[in-house]
Image: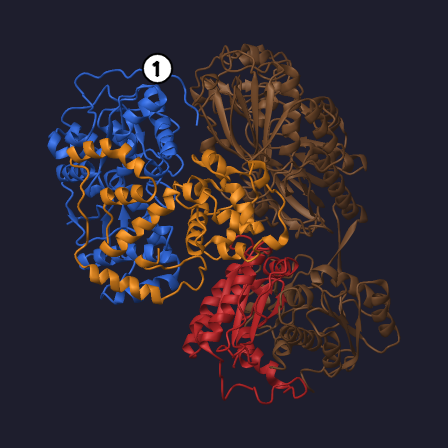
Chain colours: A blue, B brown, C red, D orange
Amino acid sequence: MDYLYYPGCSLKSTGRAYEESMLSVFRKLDLAVMELEDWNCCGATAYMSISELKAFALSARNFALAEAQCKELSTAELVVPCAACYLCLNKARRYLDEHEELREKINRALQTANLDYHNRTRIRHPLDVLANDLRPEKIKDAVVHSLSGIKVACYYGCQIVRPYADFDDQKNPHVMDDLARLLGAEPISWPLKTRCCGGSLMGTAQDVGLRLSFIILKEAVKRGCHAVITACPLCQFNLECYQPKMSNLYGESVNIPVLYFTQLMGMAFGISERELGLQRNFNRLDTASLSRISAGGEHVGI
Amino acid sequence: MSAFENKGNGTPKIGVYVCHCGINISGKVDVSEAVAFAGRLPYVTIAREYKFMCSDPGQELIAADVRSGLIDRAVVASCSPLMHELTFRRAVTTGGGNPFMFQMANIREHVSWVTLDRVAGTEKAKALIAAAVSRVARHEPLEPTRVPVNPDVLVVGGGIAGIHASLTLANAGKKVYLVEREPTIGGHMAQFDKTFPTLDCSACILTPKMSAVRAHPNITLWTYSEVDAVDGYVGNFKVRVRRKPRYVNEDLCVGCSDCIEACIFKKGKISDEFNVGLSKRKPIYIPFPQATPLVAVIDAESCAHFKTGKCKKPCADACQPNAINLEQTEEIKEIEVGAIILATGFKTFEASRISRYGYGKYENIYTSLEVERLVNAAGPTSGEIVLKNGEKPEAVGIVHCVGSRDNNTNVYCSRVCCMYSLKLAHLVKERTGAEIYNFYIDMRTPGKGYEEFYERLLREGVHFIRGRVAEISDWAMKPEEEGRIIIRAEDTLIGAVRRIPVDMVILSVGLEPQSDAEEVRRRFNISCSREGWFLERHPKLAPVSTFTDGVFLAGACQGPKDIPDSVAQAGAAAAEALALVDRGFVELEPNTAYVQEEICSGCRTCTNLCPYNAITIKKDKNVAEVNGAICKGCGTCVAACPSGALQQNLFTDEQIYSEIRGVLSHV
Amino acid sequence: MFDKNNEKEAFNPHLVAFFCNWCTYTAADLAGTARMTYEPNVRVIRIMCSGRLDPQFVLWAFREGADGVLIGGCHPGDCHYQEGNYKARRRFLLLQKYLQFMGIEKERVRMEWIAASEGDKVQSVINEMTETIRRLGPLHLEPVSMRQERSLETAEPDNIAVMKEGTL
Amino acid sequence: MEKWKSWRKIRYESELDHYFPDQIASIPGGNKIFDCIQCGTCSGMCPISPYMDYTPRQLIAMIRAGFKKDVLSSHTTWLCASCYSCTVECPKDIRLTDIMYAAKRLAIREGVYPRRFPIPVLAAEFFKSVESHGRSSEGRLLVRLFLKTNPLMMLKQMGLGFRLWLKGRLSAGQESINRKAELRNIMQALEKERMVKDKTDFMPTGREI
C-alpha cells in the first residue's frame, strides 16, 4: 500500500465520478491506494466558522486513524482529492504543528478514544502525487489515444494551491497544465485558473454563485477551449450542473463539458466510460467530433 | 606588592560620574543609589551625578576634578563608548590628565533602554560601574599613535553622487581616483529624461558635470574598471583596481563611431544596456552620445572576432587614429589613498517577480525605468510614446509601490517612486494626451516643491486612485475592455472595486541594493543593513561615515534617495573625506600589542597568527617584536600567547580580568 | 519580549558576555536605541575582536561566579580584522570540549555571530541564553569557587599571576 | 421610515468596543491586523468583494476601530468563500480568511449574525449533522437549509436534484461513520477544554444552535 485515500463527503455523492476516475487512473499507473477506515468529515469551511478547535479535532482524528492504519511506515501519505478537504486537513496539520498548546489539547481529547497524533501524516493531492511521485514518461507511456487537438482550460480553483500547498506555484500554478500536455491536449493560458467559482455560495447566495461560475465558463469559452478540467468536486458541480440556469439567466447558452482531470487522463489511457464515471456528467466531451464552441453572447459584468 | 596595585603613579584616585541623560537613564536606573554604590568602591575618591554629562558643564566637572588633583582617572557611566568616549577623554585631557586614564560604563544602550524593571536596571548599572572602576584602576597613561595621511581620495561609482563628490574634492585641490564599472560615467541619472519636480532635462544638467570630471586635472577617471582589493587602514589604504580591456585605446579614440558603422553586424543584435533592452546595439558601441569618456568599447561576449576569430576586423581598418587594439588585456592598477567614498548606487526591482502584474506576460507593460527611455528624445523611439502596435495609448495606468512596502518583496518605502510616477504621469499626458490613472497606497511628496508638483498634477486632470493594484490581466468582462489591459484594484477612498481598462501600464519599481553589494561591503570592510544597504555609522549624527574609519558613503548605496539628496550627501561625504586628508595625520587608538621581552620564550606562536604580519622575531634576543605602526590592535596574538608575554594596550589581561571580576563583584 | 512573570524561575543567573567592538557590541547598542527590552542578566564586556578572547577569560568568569558566558563576534568573512572570529571559533570549540571534560555543561558557553544590524538577534540570543542557564541552574565550582570571599577589597595578589601561567 | 433616516454615519466612542480588536487579534497570527496599511489588495483580489456590504479592507479598519456590532452583523464575513486570495497576496501577511472565521464564530456566539441569511444557517446545519454523524450528507443538508431559509428555493432546485439523483450523484440517505460514540467522546472532551489564547472560539454542542 503506497497511499491512504481520504474521500471526504462530496466524493461519496455529487463527486462520485471523481472518486471512480481517480481510483481507476491510479490503478492504471499502478499506484496502490487504500481508503482510510472510518474517516470522518474534515471539519470543512462551514464547520470552521462555528468552532475552530472542533474543526481541528475532526481533522486530527483522521490523522490519528491514518497513522494507526499504517504503523509500520514512518509517514502516512494521505491522498485527498477534494480541494476543500485538502485545504482543511492541511491547515489543521499546520496549526497542530505550529501551536503546541493546541496539539496537546487535541491529543488529550483524542486519548478518550485511545487515538493520538504524532504529526506523522503527510497530506497529498492527487495532482501532487502524479506530478512529483511519478516520472512524466510513466504517464506518457500510459496514453493509448492522445488527446491532440483538444483545447482544455485547466481550472485549479482556490483551495488546492492556496494558501498552504507547497507542490506548485501558489500564484500561478502549472501542474495540471503539464499533465494535460503529457496527454497531448493543449492547455490554454488564462488568468482565471485560480479564481473562485463561488463554492458553497451556489447553494446559499445563488445569484452570487451563478455569476462567479459563469464568469469562469464564459472566459473559457471565449478562449475557444473544448472542456474545462477541474480538480475539485465542488468546482465541477458548480460549473457543470448550473449551466442551464446560467443560460436562462444571462440569455447566452453556455454548454461546455466540465471534467475531472482524472477523467481526462482516463480517456487518454483508454479506460472505459463507466470506470471513469463519465456517464454521471451532464455533457460529454466527444473527442471524435470536436464542436468548436462559439464565443457569442454579450458580456456580463459582475 | 599586590598585582591589583596600579603601577606608575601611586594609588589610583578614581572619579565616577553617573549621567541621568535626562530621564533616558534615570528612568530605569536609580542614579543616586548607583552613585552611593560607586562611592564605596575601592580607590574611588569622588562619585558625582549629573543631568547631562556630555554637556559642557558636565565635562567641566571631570576636568575640574582632574585639575584640582582630586582624581587622576575617571569613569563615566552614561551612553555607549561608541557615542561619547572621545568627548570624555577630551575632558580628562582638558583637566591635564591622560585621555586613556578613562573608562566608560554603558548604562543607557545596554541597561536603561533594554531593561523593563527598575531594580534589575539599577543592579546591572552598578555591576557595570564596578567593572569600569576596577578596570580603570589598572589603566596606564598612553600616547595616541599618529600616522601620516595620504592626501589622495578614491571614489567608487560614477553616478551623480560619485561625480559630485569627485568634483568637490578635486576643486579643493585633492587628487581623486574615480572608478566606474560601466564604460561610461553618468549612472542612472543619465538614463532619466526629466527630473522632478522642476522638470529640467536630466542630461542637460548632468552632462556638464560629466565633462567637467573628464577635463579636471585632479581627477583620474577609470571607467570599465572595478576595485579588486582594499588593504591598509584609515589614511593609508592600498587599493587594487582592475581595468577591464575595452579593446579601444582611450587616448587615441576620438568617438567618431566610424568603427561602429564598419562593424560586420549590419545592425544591432545585442540588447542595449543603456536603453534597458528596448533597443539593440552592436558588439562595438558607445553607450550614448554624451558618454564620458566618449570612447567606443567592444564587448567580447558578442564580438565575432573573439567568438570565432574569423572576423576581418573592419572596425580596426575604419579607425583612422588606429585606436582599436584587440590584443588589449586586463590591467591592474595599484594606488594608495587616504580616504574612500563609496557611491555604488542601486538597482531597480525586478518587476517579473510579482507575477500578477503580468510584466513580461502581456505587451505594453513597462517598468518606470523603461518608460524613462521611451519618453527620452534620444531614446529608442526618439521620444514617441507608442504601443507595440504603433498606436498612441489612450489610457495609461501607473502602479505605485511595485516591490516596495511589501513583506513578500521589500518592506521599506523606496522613497522616490511617488515623485517619479508623478513626473512620468505629467510627461506621458503631455506627449499623448492619454488619460492617466495613478494607483497609490499613500502619496509621499515630502520635499521642496514636491507637494506643489502633486497639486499641479491634480489640476492637470490626472486620476489618482488610492488602492494597491490587485491584478493586471487581459481578461475582459465588457466590450470596451476587449483587447486592452485591465487593472483591477479597490478604490479605497470610495470602498468599491474598480476595473480600469488601459493600453499601457507603467510599473513604478522600487529601489534595491546592487546585486553585488554584499561582496563590495566585504571588500571595503563595512556593514550592511538588513535590506543590504550600506550601513552608516550613526543614522542621524554620522550619516555618511561607516564603522571603518576613512570609508564614507554617498548616494543611494546607503538607502533609497532622490537626486537632490544624493548630491547633498555626496557633498557631505566629500567634506568628511577632506577633513580627514587635509589634516595630514590621524590619531589611532593606541590599543596595539606589545611584548614583555623577559617573559617571551620566542615560541613564534604569534608570528603566523597576525593577519598583518606585524610580529617579527628579534634575531639577537630570540623574542617577538610588534611593529606598532602595522599592528591594528585586534589582540588575537595576545589571546594566543602561551606565556602571557604579549599584551594589548587598553586591553591587557589584567584589565580584562578585573573587568570580569568587576561585573560579578556583588553577585 | 520575554514575559517576566514566571514565579517558579526564582534563580537569576549571572551571565558575562564578550562582544566584539565592530559587530556585536554595535548590534547591542542598536538593540538599545531600538528599545528592544531583554533579560537583565547579561553583563557585556567589550573587546576589540572576538579573536582577543583568551579561553582563560571564560574560566576566570566561571570562577568569579558566572553561570554562563556568551561570546559574540562578526559573521564569518566579516571580521574587522580579517579572520579573528575564525580563530575565536577554533578556541571556542576546544574550550567547550575542555569544559565538558571538567564536568561543566557545554551549554554554559555560547558563541554567536551577530552583525551590526542585527539588534533583534542580540535580544533573542540573550533571552534564550538566560532561559537555558535558568534551566541548568547555578554553576557550583566548590571548592575552587571563591564565592564566599569574593569582593574587590580582599583581592588576592597572586590570582592573576596564577591565571597567567594557565594552571587554574 | 425612509432609508436615509437609518444612515447615521457618525459613531460615538461610547458605542465602540475597544476590546474587540484584541479579541480578534487573539487568534493565531491575528495580531497582524495591526500591521494593515489599508492598501486594498485584499478587496481587489477578492472575487466576492463586489457583493459585500463592507470590503475586506474596510472590515479590518472597522475591527481595529472597534465597530463590533457592524462587523459581526455584516454579510461580508459570511459571503467569504475562503478562497484565500487575500491571504496569499497581503503585503503584511495578514491571514484575512482566518480573521473572517474568527468574526463568524463571534457572530454566532453573540447571536448577532444576519437572521434568515442562509449561510450561517448552512453552517449550523452542517455543524449539527457532522456533530451527530461524523459526516455530512449533501442531499439532506440542502433540504434542511431550504426548509429553514426559503422553501420556495427548494422547489426551484427540485429539477436539478432529480437529474442528479438519476445520475447517482445525490441520495437522500444519511452518511455516517461507524464509531459515532468515539467521536462524541472526543467532542465532549473538547468542550471541557477551552482555547485559552483564542477568545473567539466557542464550542457549542449540537443542541446549542
Residue linked to disc 1 = A296
Q: A29 or D40, which is in the foreground?
A: D40
Image position, residue B317 (x, y; %): 56, 11
Q: Position of residue B506 (x, y in %)?
A: 56, 26
Please, which chain is the residue tagged with disc 1 on? A
Instruction: Give how far across and how far down residue D165 sits, in percent.
Output: 17, 35
Whether residue B493 can be seen here: yes
Say what amino acid the circle numbered 1 marks.
Answer: Gly
Q: Residue at x 45, y 41 (%)?
A: D86
Rate crowding at label 1 as few (under 14), some (14 to 19) or many (20 or more) other CA atoms within 10 Å: few
**Does residue A45 appear anywhere in the picture?**
no
Report whether B175 appears left or right of A240.
right
| Rendered-image quadrant of the N terminus of chain C | bottom right
* Total labels drawn: 1
- In this rendering, position of residue B541 left or right of residue D167: right
Above or below for D17 versus D141? below
Q: Is the residue B132 above or below the residue A127 in the image? A: below
Q: Nearer the viewer, residue A75 or B579?
A: A75
